[in-house]
Image (cartoon, helix red, strand yellow):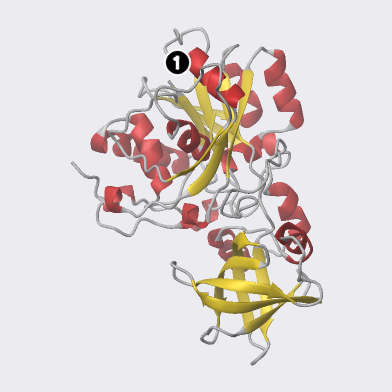
Amino acid sequence: MKLPTSLLDYHLPEELIATSPAEPRDASRLLVVSRSDEHMFHAATFRDLPTFLHADDLLVFNSTRVLPARLTGLRSDTGGRVEGLFLAEPEQGTWSVLLTSGGRLRAGTVVKLIGPNGETSGVTLELLRRGEDRGSWLARVGGADGLGVPSTEILSKLGTTPLPPYIRQARKRLGRDIPDLRDRAWYQTVYVTDRGSSPGGIPGSVAAPTAGLHFTPSLLTQLDAMGLCRAEVVLHVGLGTFKPVETEFVEDHPMHGEWACVPRETILALSERKGREKASGGRVIAVGTTSVRAIESLPEPLPTGPGAADIEFETRLLITPGFRFRLTDGLLTNFHLPRSTLMAMVSALLGDSTRGVERLKSIYARAISEGFRFYSYGDAMLILP
């Protein structure tokens, strides 16, 4: 039986949309619930996380790097402002971008990129043809500062942090003007690594794996000291993470593809814990929905033989209530947008069919009544087995 998308609706007061993170990061609040105990509802602080974990539990982190992918430019023909997002560099010197403009954009239009403070640059984007998604374009990079320059270098100089629209809108409504340099630090995990680009030319993420934003170096050190194990995946978070479900039923949503890499060491750690008694440790706790998506997309059985290696793949996995989790025992996650695939995934972890959705909405309602902050810069929720 399919899940009606309307069941993923809920009302959030505007004042609970977090426009900046807690400082320090682990001062955010943590709501602890359980898959097996519907009565568990414990409000804590994120730095209390170790008290809810066991030695030899395995935390799986997504260590992708968030790119300063948000772009601003001026049309060379009209001088009109253009805003957009870098998506990929499928070929050297050719970008896939998402653009919006006050006037209609056409093939042949040239956009001159400007920096975060409005400074001019020698980088241009010549629009070649429309992409598959609404507002997307394939563009040729040019100009004195653009020819032959890697996309990551251009973005580092001219791009800004790709904050979700709801944060930008809430800040505008509140009159909050925060320098991009602060967001560049806030919107990046402390354990980020660089594992290169995907085959499609995607060198990083256009959205943060937000559950990981709460960790500090000292908290990670504390977890290591208690014998807890850490494993890494890399999943480059794509634009589709912001896309609401617009179909009548969640299962009919056209799921976006995202590139992932699961290292051999992580596969072996997951295999070692599969089927083990979980009561005193050895549980697999995914840090964020992107980590869940990466490990649940792995082939079955897990490739652990003598020739086992890192696995790279594109995943279009859509997790809805009724999904059989093979590897994920628990989840650390933020509070998600209504009508999102992320809500559907968390619901699936809490129960089959509509029961999981009802549980999640009940948890959200109580979190709202207790003033928890929602979305990317908001508080966290730990779902124990």
Give me the residue at 65% from left, 64% from top. Answer: 70
Residue 318 image offset from top left, x and y in percent: 37, 43
Give me the residue at 46% from left, 11% from top. Answer: 278
Left or right? Give the position of 65 relative to 129.
right
Q: Quadrant of the C terminus?
A: top left
Figure check: 144 above or below 29: below
Residue 168 image offset from top left, x and y in percent: 60, 63
What SS does tag 1 mark?
A: loop
Name of the residue lying farthest toward the left: 1
Q: Amino acid at mark 1?
A: Lys
Residue 155 image offset from top left, x and y in percent: 73, 62
Name of the residue lying farthest toward the bottom: 78
Tally of numbered discs: 1
Give me the residue at 63% from left, 67% from top. Answer: 94
Residue 347 image offset from top left, x and y in percent: 36, 37
Figure check: 62 above or below 148: above
Left or right? Give the position of 230 relative to 41.
right
Q: Quadrant of the N terminus?
A: top left
Q: Which residue is mark 1?
A: 274
